[in-house]
Amino acid sequence: MAVRPSNELWQRIFSDNGRIAVSTIFFSLVLNILALTGSLFMLQVYDRVLPSGSVPTLVALGLIVLVLYAYYGVLDYVRSRIFVRVGRKVEEGLRNRVFDAMSTLSLNKANLVGGLPVQDLNTIRQFISGQGPLAYFDMPYVPLYLMVVFLLHWILGVVATISAVIIFGLALLAERATRAPSAAATLATARAQAMTEETRRNAEALFSLGMKSAMRNRWSILQGEALEHQTRANDSGASYSTFSRVFRLVIQSALLGTGAWLAVKHEISSGSIIASSIIMGRALAPIEQAVAGWQQLLGARKAYERLSRVLGQVPAERERMHLPDPKGLVEVEGATVVLPGTDKPVLQNISFRVQPGMGLGIIGPTGAGKSTMARALVGLVPLQRGAVRLDGATPDQRNSDDHGRLIGYLPQDVQIFDGTVAENISRFSPSPEASKIVEAAQLANIHEFVMRLPQGYDTPLMEGGSRLSAGQRQRLALARALFGEPVLLVMDEPNSNLDSEGELALDKAIRAALARGASVIVVAHRPSALNAIHDLLVLANGQVAAYGKRDDVLKKVGATQPAPAAAPAPAQQAGSQVISMAGKVPVPGSQTRN
């Protein structure tokens, strides 16, 4: 189904700048009238000063022209500054909105917009702030110049009008000729940029598996396609632009020749010859400028269309009434998830309940929908049917940041941001309490490691946390999940990269969260993550296969039971165990607890 473009961008660019547009139209009117100064000055020089030989008249005319040109320069400077400010205002007004839309769409892995919305906003701002729009504000005054030429002589007016129509026709032909290759170039460039980012993220696999040459060739083909389409678009635009400039020179010479012929016949004065040529040049200037900047206009228009669709896909987040902080009651009611591009539900009619201070483990074979369930719990996956509630409220009943503050989420794919250790743990809070940061780090058993870093908690981490091991990144992400004492803690494979010491720290953190009344939901394969968990949910084929007390469910599915949490040695041994359910998962719905 096609996405309806949003009128939000139109509102920001045009409606919100209506008064500025009116002022610019007035400035353009005065500027285009003042632009006649040079031609009228030459007309007076040739028709009055030269025949009379009056130097005082020449000086007076020169002073008048100097004052008018000064006014022209000031107004043109002010008009240019207005466009720069409008471009900046548009970007500042939409910057946060575009970031939110881009990040929201990035949750949908099938929607590969990447950073294109931000680039599109920058393209629109650059076009507005440039010289392109000035040509379109000057173009309505072309008839004014043609009328003045008609006043000099109707034949000169006819020649000028035909020339203007031809050049304007060239602009339309340039748009038709460059439309298809420009669109193809934009699409190919977006695909190449997406692959560039994908290659950067997966550099380790690229080198370790000998994929560099193959991926480079594929990337080069995409870049070549983008370059080919862009070259075709530029060649088409350049050909029309060149022809337009040459035609303008021909017309100016033709106008001079026609004027000379009329002067020989004593139908116009010699001053009219020069004046008509200057006026004609000024009349054709905005048209030629529009043709020359056609590629920038097309780029801005495509960016506008894409950005409108993106904003249409992600409505602006409205301000919601502030709800009291929840206790941590989690209720999942018939949750059904269908991922984009698929027909079969990944999760179907999932229901369970977790009381504050209680824990739930989610296990199941690969592809059962466990990670999707974890993402749905924290509001990252939209539900086709059903609801996920935290103390009765669905995620959309709170502002996204308020909802996220209540949740501690440790994803399977740990993501570290470009910032300090403290900033990553505190979720980049503007003014976090240092004691809360240290407390979270201690619960994740990473405090001592952080203190050994060159700058401690102020040590900068590059994007992805490349200076940390996989286990250290996971424990840092655990500290981030624990920061702020969230009422709901959701962890997806939290011990996948942890050693025995890290697993003991994880068990301690889970017990601490349960002790303070938080709800804890753990997706796990290795049983040591479930030591402190009381209930267990088994997923198979996206449905509930079993649900009940942990030990009872593990016996029913024939899985290895976790070792008692109080004994460190068994927990260390359990670190190498995996919950195995090889073919022993019961038929969905046969063993459930209401």
Image (cartoon, rainbow, N blue to C red):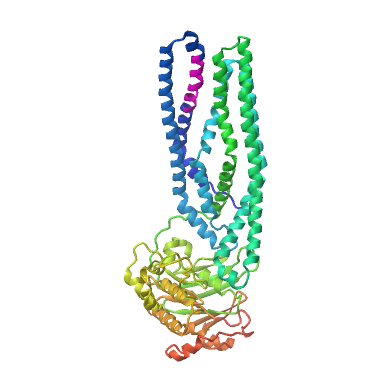
Q: Position of residue 226 (x, y in %)?
A: 64, 52
261 w.r.t. 546: above or below = above
580 w.r.t. 47: above or below = below
What residue span does the magenta drawing correspond to? 31-45
Residue 516 appears in the rendering: no
Q: Position of residue 357 (x, y in %)?
A: 41, 78
- Would residue 227 be found to the left or right of residue 402 on screen? right
Q: Position of residue 491 (x, y in %)?
A: 48, 75
Identify the image quadrant of the N terminus: bottom right
Q: Position of residue 135 (x, y in %)?
A: 54, 34
Image quarter of residue 556? bottom right
Residue 360 appears in the rendering: yes
Give the total number of marks visible in the rendering.
0
181 w.r.t. 492: above or below = above
- Would residue 342 be found to the left or right of residue 427 on screen? right
Residue drawn at x 56%, y 30% as measured from the top left: 285
- Foreground residue, 71 or 15? 71
259 w.r.t. 313: above or below = above
Residue drawn at x 60%, y 84% as measured from the top left: 581
> What main secondary structure does the magenta stretch of the protein show?
helix
Residue drawn at x 62%, y 83% as measured from the top left: 586
- Would residue 75 be found to the left or right of residue 112 on screen? left
- Foreground residue, 441 or 516? 441
Q: Say if the magenta span includes residue 177.
A: no
